[in-house]
Image (cartoon, rainbow, N blue to C red):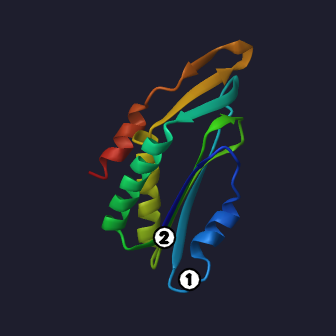
């Protein structure tokens, strides 16, 4: 079971975890990651854009790969778009499995691939009206190499 949502609205981390494991007594572990917008320097807001059909399809591909690598019992991915301010939730990834190691590794894998492959475009709005599109980071690309 997987659930992917791309939305402008905020999400409740506890509710997402509860929904993933609701009514399931076979799940022994849920590992999750919640990403927040950092208030680096003079950042006023982060604008996220995406191409809906492409974004969901790409995330589905990586969830399918995670399911092939680990015995998962459920995955949830929530990614926000629109204008987000420092401190706002931006992304939630959770993986459920019978055992913690599988859940941790799958959530880590999915987050690495979201950072490097999911088609989101980020624009940083800075104080004074300046701004820049966020470029891919070498460190993110290096992180994803370990899964090959």
Q: Is 32 placed above or below 99 here?
A: above
**What residue do we see at 71% from left, 58% from top?**
12
Q: What residue is shown with label 1?
A: 24
Residue 130 x, y percent position in the rendering: 65, 14
Residue 32 x, y percent position in the rendering: 56, 61
Q: How far apart are labels 1 and 2 at the CA level? A: 10 Å
Residue nearest the observer in this picture, 43 or 4: 4
Q: Are marks 1 and 2 in contact (CB under 8 Å)?
A: yes
Mark positioned earlier in the residue sequence (1 or 2): 1
In the rendered image, which quarter is residue 105 located in?
A: bottom left
In the rendered image, which quarter is residue 13 located in?
A: bottom right
Residue 144 x, y percent position in the rendering: 35, 46
Residue 96 x, y percent position in the rendering: 50, 71
Q: Is 143 placed above or below 23 here?
A: above
Can the viewer see residue 38? no
**What residue do we see at 65% from left, 39% from top?**
37
Q: What residue is shown with label 2?
A: 74
């Amino acid at each position: 079971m997987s659930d992917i949502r791309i939305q402008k609205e905020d999400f409740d981390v506890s509710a997402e975890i509860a929904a993933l494991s609701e009514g399931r007594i076979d799940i022994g572990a849920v590992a999750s990651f919640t990403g927040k917008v950092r208030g680096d320097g003079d950042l006023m807001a982060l604008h996220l854009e995406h191409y809906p059909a492409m974004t969901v399809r790409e995330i589905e591909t990586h969830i399918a790969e995670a399911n092939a690598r680990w015995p998962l019992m459920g995955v949830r991915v929530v990614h926000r778009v629109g204008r987000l301010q420092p401190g706002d939730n931006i992304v939630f990834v959770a993986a459920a499995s019978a055992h913690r190691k599988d859940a941790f590794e799958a959530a880590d894998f999915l987050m690495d691939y979201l950072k490097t492959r999911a088609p989101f475009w980020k624009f940083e709005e800075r104080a004074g009206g300046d701004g820049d599109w966020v470029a891919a980071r070498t460190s993110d690309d290096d992180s994803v190499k370990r899964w090959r």
